[in-house]
Image (spheres, helix red, strand yellow):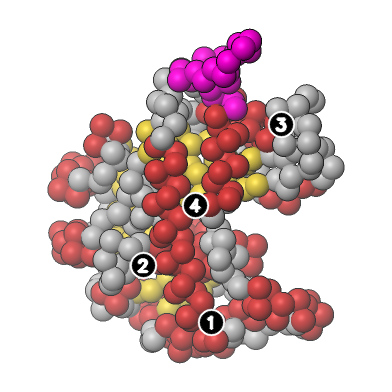
Amino acid sequence: MSQPFDMGLLRSTAHSPSWAMLNRLAPDSGAGRSGPAGRGEPQERLDFCIPCNPYFPTPEMFARLRDSLESTLTYYPSDTDTVTAELCSVLGLNPQTVAMGNGSTELITWIDHLLVKESLAVPIPTFGRWTDQPMETGKRVDMFPLREDQDFALDLQEYVRFIRRRGSRVAVVCNPNNPDGGYLRRQQILWLLDELVDLDLVVIDESFIDFVDAERAASVASEAAIRPNVIVLKSLGKNFGLHGIRFGYLVANPALAGTVRRALPKWNLNAFAETVVFMLKDYAVPYRNSLTLVSRDRANMSLALAGLPGMVVFLSQGNFLLVKLPDGIDGAALRDRLLAEHGVFVRECGNKLGSSSQFLRLVVRPYEDVQRLITALQATLYPAPPVYGYEYETQQPLRALTG
């Protein structure tokens, strides 16, 4: 089967291509049809790459967004202070401790420009902007490797010793971490903040914290508002499944938050972000329900993937799972075949610092979607050779996917 587009595009940057790019390059390619050669009825391309919330926003919210589309596109949004005040009223935060950005990436950029003077420590693998952004502006990035034989768990005492040895002035922890979903309990993070009170800055990136079910009060945002050198970063797009709107926020003491807030453009939030923020108070219950459903799906999906021969699934508190492929399988080649032959789009982790192409990050999705993923993986990794007269099932993964 001809590939739907140049697969080299999947390797061109540190991040995966956007969903819009895939659809522009191959809108009618046949990718996603059932069967290895596109036989059968067409199927919609299925995304296991972009970490969305499949249950939120609700259909009613999307209907309201469609109804307001003309005015949303026609008129300027309110200024950021107005949108921030509404968000804080919903979340119970003090607006003086909050700065809202056009996505968490904008806030990472400003944190780097304004508050990182010389060096930054960060565990790897993690979200790429925490390494790429400071390196782009000439800072020293001290990378603390997470070990696969420890399930990529962050040893906080070792991390503190590493920071002291390197003389890092800023420290970052993503909690849960991306791509493995590893989670540090609230008391562990508070211990870290106490240990690093002398640093210029400590950032706790809680972009996926709402998906945690290990404890009820997971966030340390309330502590960030009163500590001298702490910022907690949040991503509304990841929580709500609205990456395209681009909105996030940080919580810090009023002086730190004000430093970032004053640097931001006055209209850095778009009208879609404003519309969603002003809808949130009406949908608190459906949002909480969506998190319960994602937690359920995460457990079921983990079990399904762990049932594949040679597949290793790491424990996660995010809305994604990190898996290690069977020995000898190259993730980039597997990703290309899953997309070309089955219309299943996955995140291969070979371009993440501290990771390799033997790892995939798979977004948590509902049961029916996971069944399609499992079927695609089985067909690609464990193809049954033709045997006449009886059924044959191989238990060894295909070794041809090595480049």
- Which residue carries the number 1 mark? 283
Q: Is residue 96 magenta?
A: no
* Badge 2 amino acid: Val
**Mark 4 to mark 2 CA distance (whole Å):** 24 Å
The residue carrying pointer 1 sits among few (fewer than 14), some (14 to 19) or many (20 or more) residues within 10 Å by Cα, namely: some
**Mark 1 to mark 4 CA distance (whole Å):** 22 Å
Q: Is 115 placed left or right of 32 in the picture?
A: left
Quick check: 70 above or below 396?
A: below
Main SS category, magenta section? loop
* Badge 4 amino acid: Val
Labels 4, 2: front one: 4
The residue carrying pointer 2 sits among few (fewer than 14), some (14 to 19) or many (20 or more) residues within 10 Å by Cα, namely: many
- Which residue carries the number 2 mark? 232
Which residue extends farthest front?
389
SS at badge 3: loop
**Mark 3 to mark 4 CA distance (whole Å):** 23 Å
**Mark with earlier residue (1, 4):** 1
**Mark with earlier residue (3, 4):** 3
SS at badge 1: loop
SS at badge 4: loop
**Mark 3 to mark 2 CA distance (whole Å):** 46 Å
- Which residue carries the number 4 mark? 364
Q: Is residue 385 magenta?
A: yes
Residue closer to the observer: 280 or 40: 40
* Badge 3 amino acid: Gly
- Which residue carries the number 3 mark? 35
